[in-house]
Image: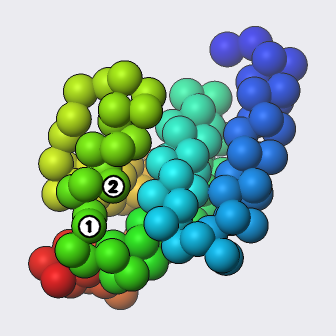
Amino acid sequence: MDTDAFEKQLVAAKLAAEAFRNLAKERPDTLLSVALTLGAMSYASTLASRHAEAAKFSREGLLALAQFLEASPDGQQKAFNDVADAVDIERVSARDVVYRLRGNYIQACENAGLEPEVALLQRLVYALRS
């Protein structure tokens, strides 16, 4: 991967994540966008073999995802569908996205030699069941 191109993309993704974080303070429904943006940043970091950074982004994304799920237990699937429709991708279940991002976090931690936060993983599962 071209390091300069990666760094430029990472800066752009960080700016997007920060904009979503700021928006989420007033509109918690945008926490899903924060989570997905951070998930993408984690994936890109993994591709660049920046495993500690990938684990950090993944953890932060899971925190945003947990907050989103807890704030909108009745509208979870609709929000996931809205995002999929907005970017013209196939709809997937909220549960599938949660478990995929959860698995990515566990793998990123493993790659970085870190222990995943069990409490965070449990919080996600509990929030999904709500």
- Describe residue 95's horizontal placement relative to residue 34 as left or right: left
Helix, strand or loop for disc 2: helix
Dot 1 and dot 2 residues touching (CB under 8 Å): yes
Tell me the crowding category of disc 1: few under 14, some 14 to 19, or many 20 or more residues within 10 angstroms, Cα based.
few
* Residue 92 place in picture, x, y as percent: 19, 40
Q: Position of residue 8 (x, y in %)?
A: 84, 26
| Type of amino acid under label 2 | Ala
> Depth check: 103 or 79 in front?
79
Q: In which quarter of the image is residue 60?
A: bottom right
Q: In which quarter of the image is residue 117?
A: bottom left
Amino acid type at circle 1 is Gly
Q: Which residue is drawn at 26% across and 67% down?
A: 75
- The residue at which mark 2 appears reads as 79
Pinpoint residue 121: horizontal percent, then vertical percent. Answer: 31, 75
Which residue in the structure is indicated by mark 1? 75
Judge by depth and name the residue closer to the eye, 48 or 8: 8
The residue lying at 66 percent from left, 76 percent from top is: 26
